[in-house]
Amino acid sequence: MPKESVDNDLIESTLELSERAFRELFPILPKEWLNLDLSTPQLKVVLLLLVSGPCRMSVIASALGVSLATGTGVVDRLVERGVVVREGDPEDRRVVLCRLSSKGEKMLLGLVQLARNHAEMMFRSLSLEKLMAVRAGLEALLEAGEATKDQLGISAASNGKFTNKPMKAFSPAKKTRKRL
């Protein structure tokens, strides 16, 4: 069998395993996320703010693929619910940044903690050898992620944790306008 075929088969079977592992590690997220009572655009905004930190409205609208007015409407509803706050940029008083409120952070980080607790229980059930193999695999994935982040157009969170650094730019592969 040619090397390329073996590599493709190995990559495909590894992708299937990673999808199964993801579903095993995070089975509680779908139910918990559905209980958030957020629309899809609202959920996208809070996830963007969790991962990227404070953002300008233009960045949020671009990430959603909507007009500035539509993006502002989505954020307005999150502000009304106390999930997002608007504040001035200390470096430029003309700029308004949106960030998660403490209520919004607690809501999302609580869901992340539930998933972490589930993963910890699974890891504790492994033998030392298997746990070390999982760790080596995760380290290899992080190295591959770092090596390919420019190709994928993403930035890695510092030290594997969520950061509060503002997102400088977002350039979706396809710019479409959607009504939300």
Image: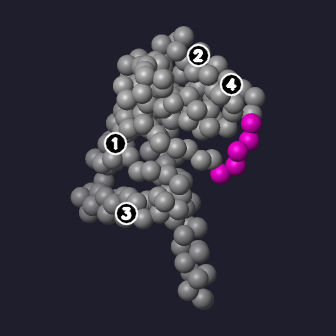
Q: Element type at marker 1?
A: loop
The disc at residue 143 is 3
Q: Percent x, y for residue 8?
A: 59, 75
State how far apart marks 4 and 1 are (Cα).
Answer: 30 Å
Please give the residue where the numbered disc 4 appears in the rendered image.
70
Q: Element type at marker 2?
A: helix
Residue 95 vs residue 8: left or right? left
Seen at 47% across and 42% down, the residue is 168
Q: Which residues are magenta?
A: 173-177
Circle 3 or circle 2, nearest the eye: 2
Give the residue type at disc 3: Glu
Seen at 59% across and 47% down, the residue is 171
Q: Element type at marker 3?
A: helix
Based on the picture, tell me whether residue 175 belongs to the magenta stretch. Answer: yes
Instruction: Give neighbour class at mark 2: few <14, some 14-19, many 20+ (Cα, 10 Å).
Output: some
Circle 4 or circle 1, nearest the eye: 4
